[in-house]
Image (cartoon, grey):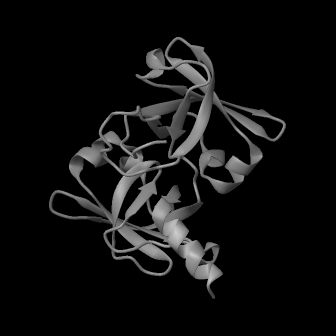
Amino acid sequence: MFTGIIEDIGVVSNLKNDLDNLHISIKSAITSELKIDQSVAHNGVCLTVVKINNDEYTVTAIKETLEKTNLGTLQIADKVNLERAMKLGNRLDGHIVQGHVDQTAICTNIKEENGSWVFTFNYDSTLNNITIEKGSITVNGTSLTVVNSKVDTFSVAIIPYTYEHTNFNTFKIGTTVNLEFDVLGKYVAKLVDLNK
């Protein structure tokens, strides 16, 4: 379980294909605090630490993960949003995030405003995921509030701190991002679908 509050931006240091799997090595300031078998969210994708070497650790993404997320498009030196699993008893500063990406989206617009940015994303609505105005959404693991919610598009407003401390500052029009929709919204969508 995660909160969507990014702890660090890791840098991809190595990528190794192994059959249908991809071993991803990351250099990060939090590596010294990790241990083997620990869960870490990478752009919102929960992966298990399988190896640690100095300031670098390795996780493995399987075929399903690579097909459903943007991790298969990673390149050496790419920046990745990182969050360790939350501890019981800590504040829940973001929202409840499972680390299970529902689908990807494409950045379709970036508007710089006076002291903030508005990013707009388009996603495949045939997968029955929904956003609601002022509801929660996780974009590349970052807990955000939805603005301008529509059937297959939504926007999020980014403050300077979030822009500087996540990989949002690397986004361009056409960037593919991971989405995890609000868990309560997913249950509501499922119930509505069942009652049709």
Question: Is 43 placed above or below 10 here?
Answer: below
| Image spot of residue 25 (x, y percent) | 60, 27
Kindly identify the residue that appears in the image at 51 percent across and 57 percent down: 180
Kindly identify the residue that appears in the image at 57 percent across and 22 percent down: 57
Q: Nearer the viewer, residue 145 or 70?
A: 145
The furthest residue to the bottom? 196
Q: Nearer the viewer, residue 10 or 146?
A: 146
The furthest residue to the top? 54
| Image spot of residue 105 (x, y percent) | 53, 64
> How many labels sit on residues?
0
Kindly identify the residue that appears in the image at 62 percent across and 31 percent down: 48
Question: Is 196 placed above or below 121 here?
Answer: below
Tell me: 13 left or right of 66.
left
Kindly identify the residue that appears in the image at 16 percent across and 57 percent down: 115
Q: Nearer the viewer, residue 3 or 70?
A: 3
| Image spot of residue 52 (x, y percent) | 59, 16
Report if residue 84 is visible in the image. Answer: yes
Question: Is 80 placed above or below 67 here?
Answer: above
| Image spot of residue 41 (x, y percent) | 51, 39
Which part of the image, by quadrant, shows the C terminus?
Answer: bottom right
The furthest residue to the left? 114
